[in-house]
Image (spheres, grey):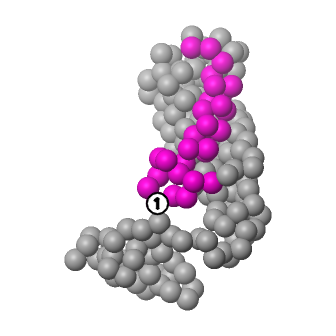
Amino acid sequence: MCLLHAASESIAGFNMNETDPRLTHLDDDGAARMVDVGGKPATRRRAVASGIISMSAEALAAIRAGNAPKGDVLGTARIAGIMAAKRTGELIPLCHPLGLEAVNVDFTYEDADGAGAIRATATASLTGRTGVEMEAMTAASIALLTIYDMAKVIDKGMVISEVRLIEKTGGKSGDWKASAV
C-alpha cells in the first residue's frame, strides 16, 4: 500500500472536502496527482501570509539604517518574495502554476527587550480556478530567508518563525481568517 494512501486512510475522519473525505491530491490507488481544476469557475482569490525573523539589536539597526554590508536588505527581500511567489508551481510538487495578478510584500519592525524582529507580510491575488495561499506563504518565506542571507554576516543566530496563512478569500471553500495567536 502506498504511504500516501495509508496516510489518507488514517485521517479519513478529517474532512478535507465536505462531500469527499479523501485528500484531493491522491487518486483512488493512493498515488499523488495534480488536481484537475479545469471544471471549476474562475473566481477572485486573495491570500495573505506572514512570518517573522528575530535578530539582534545590531542586525535590526543595520537593516533599519540601510547600511547592512550586503546592501538594501528589505528591498532585495521584497523582490525575492515576489519572484518566489511567481515560481511556486515549480517549487512545490502538485501546486498549479498560476498567472498571478498581484503580489505585494511588506515589512514591519517589531522591537522588544534589546533585540528585534521584522515581520514579512505577503499578499497574492488573481482571478482563477485555484487559490493563492501557497504563493503568499512562499513569498513570505523567501522574503524572510533573503533577510537572513543578507544579514547573517551581522547575526548568524537569527530565527525565522510563525510563517502562516493569515487569511484567504474566494473559491469554493469561501473566506477564511486565522484566529489570533
Residue drawn at (25%, 73%) of the image: 2
From the viewer's perspective, is 6 left or right of 51?
left
Q: Which quarter of the figure is the C terminus placed in? A: bottom right
Q: Is residue 96 magenta?
A: yes
SS at badge 1: loop
* Crowd around label 1: few <14 · some 14–19 · many ≥20 (10 Å): few
Q: Quadrant of residue 83?
A: top right
Q: Is residue 7 magenta?
A: no
Tag 1 residue: 94
Q: What segment is highlighted magenta in the picture?
A: 70-98
Residue type at the position of mark 1: Leu
Residue 99 percent location from the top left of the image: 67, 52
Q: Looking at the image, is 97 positioned above or below residue 114?
A: below
Name the residue at 38% across, 68% down. Answer: 32
Q: Position of residue 43 (x, y in %)?
A: 75, 68
The percent coordinates of residue 146 (x first, y second) are 55, 30
